Amino acid sequence: MLNRILRKTTQPGGPKDGAAPAAGAPDAAEMFIFEGVRQGRQKSFEELYRLYHPRLQRFLMHMIRQGDAVVEEVLNDTMLVVWRRADAFDGRSKLSTWIFGIAYRKALKALSRQDLPVDDTDLPETEDPSPGPESVMGFMQQRRRLQEAMSELSVDHRAVVELCYFQDMSHAEIAEIVGCPPETVKTRMFYARRRLRALLEDLGDREAPGASS
Amino acid sequence: MSNVVVPIETDPHQAVLALLPWYARERLSGEEQSTVREHLQHCAACRAELEAERSLQAALVDSREEAPVSARDTEAALRRMRQLMKTDAPTPAKRSWMPWAIGLQAAAIAVLAVVVARATLEAPAPYKALSAAPMTVPAAGQAETLVMFRPGADEAGIRKALLAHHAVMIGGPTESGAYRVQLPGGAQALAALRAEGVVALAESLEPPQQQARP
């Protein structure tokens, strides 16, 4: 069952866009912009903001799972730290790692402030998917199952999954962002994947009680 | 329980399984990548896991059907960011230049003392607090420029490029490896400097219309 769900949309599956550690040109360009930020140039900051806004928005949206206003508040809080504390970046890590680390901590703070359950399942229930060709229905179901499964993960596990699969970060980078040893990141990822697969099995069985895997 | 760290490295099998998400994305270090590759060659179980991992990744990515964040959204958020900066943020302390700033301030005081004592009639040089060069007063048409050199650029190459454009290095390297350079000749010279093989990036630090700092 699980394999059917998973394999359906499989493509070669490898790295999307040359995921090899892309040091060099983009990093140098980013650092160049950041140098201006460090000197207090608002124009440079705005350039950096435009560069990071889409990535941070994605990350925070899935981390804190709140409305746009909350996401933007956390995002702008993050960037305010980047602006005010640019001197705190010591250049030992990548700039993106530093910025995502700030965003991660801000997200955790926002979650605790709102006293949100970290294992919330606030995805809209679509009990009765609109009728359509079977393939479309299957696809929609699968998508919904995956979204549900993601929302069932703890915030720690969700963070590593987000950063690995959707932000294309290495385990060392993720370790720096979430502030734990790389071994812990690997362990979290291991259990997150296992949990995702188990949840997908559960969800699949619940929807199709007769079906055997 | 996410806080419990179960050692999964003891078993080579487990160690490989733990690395598969990154192996599938080619985000491992060279050494790790080859360790996993070697293990996969003779381990059918892990190869099957890799297949499952790839399927999971593909399915998860497919499950996200989000419209890309539009430039309009970014600009709207940026407008509110500007507001936030205005109301909330003091001008960031440029601490990376702090040692310079202190030196400059001392120099400025000394210069001022001399000027007052002699009561010269010279027109005062435009005051440039933190971005001013320590030893040079920028003459008209001398733009302060931030330059990054290509990795591997050697001293001779850098010297040649700077001499060719009558540029003078006045600061750096910063933590990110950039240098501050005094460059005469305006935009044309800047373009010419950028075209030098050893130069990765060059940008004027003096947009003429703004950046007056208190």
Image (tube, grey):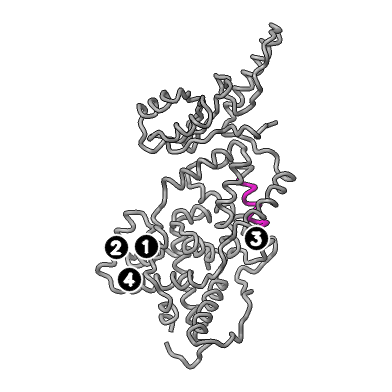
Mark 2 closeness class: few <14, some 14–19, many ≥20 residues within 10 Å:
some
Q: Which residue is mark 3?
A: A71
Is disc 1 in the same subunit as disc 4? Answer: yes
| Residue A73 counted in the magenta span | yes
Location of residue B194 in the rendering, given as x and y in whole percent from the top left corner: 45, 35
In 3D space, how far apart are the residues under numbered discs 2 and 3 (Cα atoms)? Answer: 40 Å
Magenta residues (range): A71-82
Query: Which mark is nearer the camera, 2 or 3?
Result: 3
Element under label 1?
A: helix
Q: Residues within 10 Å of mark 4 (few under 14, many from 20)?
A: some
Label number found at residue B46: 4
The first of marks 2 and 4 along the sequence is 2
Secondary structure found at label 2 = helix
Per the model, the C-alpha gap separating discs 2 and 4 is 10 Å
- Seen in the picture, residue B187 relative to A89 is either above or below; the reply is above
Q: Which residue is mark 1?
A: B23
**Residue drawn at point x = 65 percent, y = 47 percent:** A80
Q: Position of residue A97 (x, y in %)?
A: 51, 51
Q: Nearer the viewer, residue B8 or B129?
A: B129
- Say what amino acid the circle numbered 1 marks: Tyr
Residue on which the image places disc 2: B37
Q: Position of residue B122 (x, y in %)?
A: 67, 11
The percent coordinates of residue A159 (x first, y second) are: 53, 62
| C-alpha span from label 1 to label 3 | 31 Å
